[in-house]
Image: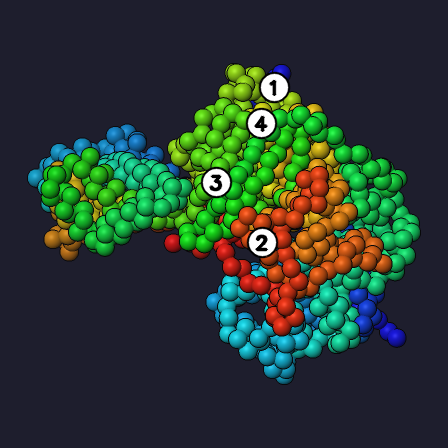
Amino acid sequence: MTTVDTAPAVAPAARTARAWRTLCSSRTAVIGLAIVAVHVVIALLAPLLASYDPIAGDASQALLGPGGAHWAGTDQYGRDVLARVLYGGRYALGVSVAATVVSVALGTVAGCAAALRGGWFDDLLGRVLDAVLAVPAVLALLVVVTALGTGPAVIVLAVAVVFVPQVVRVVRGAALAVVPADYVTAARARGEGTWSILRREVLPNIVDVVCVEFAMRASWVVLLISSLSFLGFGADPPTPDWGLMVAENRTAITVVPMASVAPIIALATLVIGLNLAADGLSKAWGVDRIREGS
Amino acid sequence: MTPLVSVNSLSVAYRSGGRDVPVVREVSLEAAAGRTLALVGESGSGKSTLAAALLGHLRHGSRVTGGSVEVDGRDVFALPAPELRRLRGRTVAMVAQNAGQALTPSMRVGRQIAEAGGDIPVIDLLDQVRLPRPAELARRYPHELSGGQQQRVALAMAIAARPKVLVLDEPTTGLDVVTQRGVLDLIAALRDELGLAAVLVSHDLGVVAHLADEVCVLKSGRVVESAPTRQLFARPAEPYTKRLLASVPRLDDAGLALVRESGERDIRPRAVVPGDAPVAVSARDVTVDYGRSRVVHGVSFEVRRGEVLALVGESGSGKSTLAWALAGLRTPSGGTMTHESGDLARPAQRRPMSLRRRVQLVFQNADTSLNPRRSVGDAVRRPLRFFRTAGGRAESAERARRLIADVRLDPALADRLPAQLSGGQRQRIGIARALAGEPDVLVADEITTALDVSVQAEVLRLVDDLRRERDLACLFISHDLAVVRGIADRVVVLRGGVVVEEGPTEAVFAAPRHPYTRRLMAAALEPDPDARPPVEVTPDWADAAQEGDVWTDHGDGHRARRWRPADTSATPDAPDTPPTSIAEGVS
């Protein structure tokens, strides 16, 4: 009987192992994920790594260039730039991950449901999403933020409004390729509900598309959230945040260039890491835009 | 005369996991102008690899590990790329299995044929492949043609540059028997007209017997037996060839053939259905519509417990639509369908659970009927849990193993993924999944069409065993009359959504009364090169059924729809009529 009990675990374990192997075979994916991992570790360990308080200013130390005491110099309020950059990833990563998870999760469920139900539901959802997509992303974000005020929860909501339609389109395309398969028909003939078909039959077969979609959306979300901060709609001063730092220090860029360049480098490496990961994952798992139908 | 194609101890292998896996092993063969050489074998025998090698093409990752392929005196694998390109099309041309995919969907067929090269006008080529109204047809897009017409267009493209060798990879697989017959006759005619050397790859021994001059039987990349067609079919030398031949169902079998290891056939008499067996499913005047077009026009039938009823017809005859309606996937627009425990006219989701599990469907294509990401044990466990036919987790796992054993598979396979099983094994799992609901009606939709001939025989036997053991009512859907012959107790012949003939299997096969049934029987290809059509075909006929006077009765439940010979002035049917409904989408 032991074999029977362990049976369900065997296939998923083998599958995870295979997914991991193909992932490791792609150098792009490994490098990308490594960069992202470094950013995550830095954000988590920022209190240990930084030797200054990122918020406390010291007017006597304002506008210093890089030196022994302040490796990346200080900004106009005398705050240590390095400490602010190290802490700045916390906001960017935290809000971005939350926003991406919400967008991809909602988009996946809606996309699969649209592919599975078809008919008027699919049509209606498609037209509504088209309407949302017609509004430029930053404009839509600003509308939501202006109406509901700032704060992480509002930013997550705003990003979801912008990105869910795009995720829905991609996932719907991938799910449409699975839905006509006979195993889905068999589940329908059993009379299973939409949710159970979606979870048992459709999702496992598009999980690679969803993963790639997640990595790709994450890089866009990071950029978008930083743009919001730059425009003054994201993090409130004096929160250490990359977008906000660039906005604060761009007027002093000729005096202390590092104060603007350091957060830009941090942001750029994170986005490059996410992009490499998305690219590598999609190649390693055989997902490309043609198959996604979008 | 020197042969046009000569393959000298060719070996092909691909690399997998750091070592060579041989696909073709030291195969030698020759084909001469005006002759047809057939490569026969089951899936995995290397026949398609061999066919592609004749065009100097190998699948990605494969390479020639020994021997050579000479076509028209040139070694194709030694040719530089530009010359190889010239060789393809001008000297050797290929017709692929699925013409629907071989044609570009966004280009008119006339332009595609013109692109294939050669100086012959497109219209003449279309005329040569016996397509009616070639000028009009050239302006159509591939999707506007039927499967048979697409295959004819593919043939026209292949012969456009007047090649010397024609390689045909399963040219008629997936076509109906009647269409298949037409395409095969055309290939034979073209070969004779143009003096082509034809190399035919097929798993269908009926096709081979009909077309080939010499046959080469392949198994696991090796030539098992090579002989002139007549000799091979009359006196096969190797046990493998004998078994293969014996596995082919024939129109004159009185029951299912059981093939012994030595290749002898035992005919197992059909199970006797007791006269008082209860009716499991009955359909009365069922109509099904797709949008505005009606694909099933008032079909009635009954299936009793322990009985196999065959629904036979070409694609577009509405047989798969009827299966879907029974399974609750499509709601009939009229008529009644009843099960002994409830009404079947409602879609699956609205049927009570107890009724839903009683009617189960087995799919045609075992490759897509199982979720590739879930173990096969999981596929069988799901309905057990869903229909609550098994209690707890442990019980359902145990029941799933028993069901897998019931379909004559090793229960240890439960942990495998579908991709790790063969086509026949997957189809058995599909049957096990259907049995998990403890149904009393099994709807089998072309379940053997995609299988190799020996596997097909095993699956047919399994279905026959199961209906005896479990007293199942089975609706067996097929386009192949020979397959139906051994297993069905009664036959219903459908044409365009209308029943044209029905009756006990023996009676229908002994004396088919309707011209359409006769046409189907005449088109069935027997594995015997000297086989004559068992019945005479009435080429022209018209429907003569009238309100209140639809049937001519031939006794014992055997009846045919009324018909009359057509006026001689009427135009005969075109060889392939284009699809008139979207019913093909599900068949």
User: What is the distance, in whole Å, between disc 3 and disc 4 at their CAs?
Assistant: 23 Å
User: What is the distance, in whole Å, between disc 3 and disc 1 at their CAs?
Assistant: 41 Å
In the depicted view, which residue is nearer to us: B39 or B338?
Answer: B338
Residue at x 88% of width, y 44% of height: B239
Where does the image place residue A250, in percent across and percent down from the top left? Answer: 15, 52
At numbered mark 4, what does the secondary structure look like: helix, strand or loop?
Answer: loop
Amino acid type of the residue that numbered disc 4 sits on in the rendered structure: Pro
Query: Where is the C terminus of chain A found, in terms of image quarters?
Result: bottom left
At numbered mark 1, what does the secondary structure look like: helix, strand or loop?
Answer: helix
Within 10 Å of disc 3 (Cα), the crowding (few <14, some 14-19, many 20+) is some
How is colour applied across the structure in the image? rainbow
Where does the image place residue A135, in percent across and percent down from the top left? Answer: 20, 53
Mark 1 — residue? B398
Query: Vertically, is A129 above or below B122?
Result: above
At numbered mark 2, what does the secondary structure look like: helix, strand or loop?
Answer: loop
In the depicted view, which residue is nearer to us: B214 or B494?
Answer: B494
Which residue, as the protein is rendered here, is positioned at the far front?
B548
Q: Chain of mark 1?
A: B
Residue at x 31% of width, y 38% of height: A106
Task: Determine which of the numbered discs, if any, sits on residue B545 in the image.
Answer: 2
Task: Determine which of the numbered discs, if any, sits on residue B335 in the image.
Answer: 3
Of badges 2 and 4, nearer the viewer stands 2
In the depicted view, which residue is nearer to us: B161 or B257?
Answer: B257
Query: Vertically, is A24 above or below B183?
Result: above
Amino acid type of the residue that numbered disc 3 sits on in the rendered structure: Gly
